[in-house]
Amino acid sequence: MVEAAQAEGVNLVILSGFRSVEEQTHLFFDVKAERGQNTDTRADVSAPPGYSEHHTGYSADMGDANEPETHLSQSFDQTAAFKWLQQNAAYYSFELSFAKGNPEKVSYEPWHWRYVGDRKSLEIFYRARKK
């Protein structure tokens, strides 16, 4: 997918893929403490350990190498990389995980995409939607 984007002049980069529970523990608890956030506020932007799509190995945070200031920011949805993903990600079995007003009530994350191209990934993500 990255190569296909590059062939069209879009510099799509993968910022984060699989994360262990230990990595997610740091991202949740240590960053929460650094920012003085309460648990609910932190959970709006980062899943608690054991609940992140990154643990599945089927999700990735994407960015635009030409606009690194938009990485992990809602302004990513104004980039060429996001527009390319909207038009092309489905060809590679990727979908936006957390669109605006998503049923999971997770903050809008235009950079966070999940792979849904095999049975296991579909079972993981679509079973979760029914809860």
Image: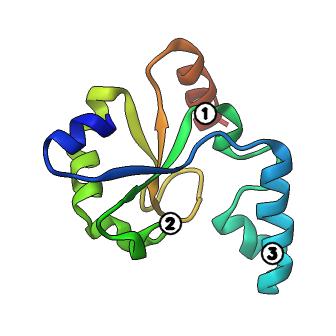
Disc 2 marks a residue whose amino acid type is Leu
Depth check: give the residue in front, 78 or 9.
9
Tell me the residue at 37%/74% (across/down). Answer: 75
Disc 3 marks a residue whose amino acid type is Lys
Disc 1 marks a residue whose amino acid type is Lys
* In this rendering, position of residue 125 left or right of residue 67: right
Question: Compared with residue 28, is residue 55 higher up or lower down, i.e. above or below?
Answer: above
Depth check: give the residue in front, 95 or 33.
33
Dot 3 falls on a residue whose secondary structure is: helix
Residue 42 x/y as whole percent: 74, 71
Tell me the residue at 86%/79% (across/down). Answer: 33
Dot 1 falls on a residue whose secondary structure is: loop
Query: CA gap, disc 2 to disc 3?
Result: 16 Å
Please give the label number shown on residue 32: 3
**Label 1 packing within 10 angstroms: few (<14), some (14-19), many (20+):** few
The outermost residue toward the top is 119
Q: Nearer the viewer, mark 2 or mark 1?
A: 2
Tell me the residue at 22%/44% (across/down). Answer: 6
How many labels, in total?
Answer: 3
Please give the label number shown on residue 130: 1
Q: Is tag 3's residue or tag 1's residue first in the polypeptide sequence?
A: 3
**Label 3 packing within 10 angstroms: few (<14), some (14-19), many (20+):** some
Residue 103 x/y as whole percent: 53, 51
Query: CA gap, disc 2 to disc 1?
Result: 27 Å
- Residue that badge 2 annotates: 72
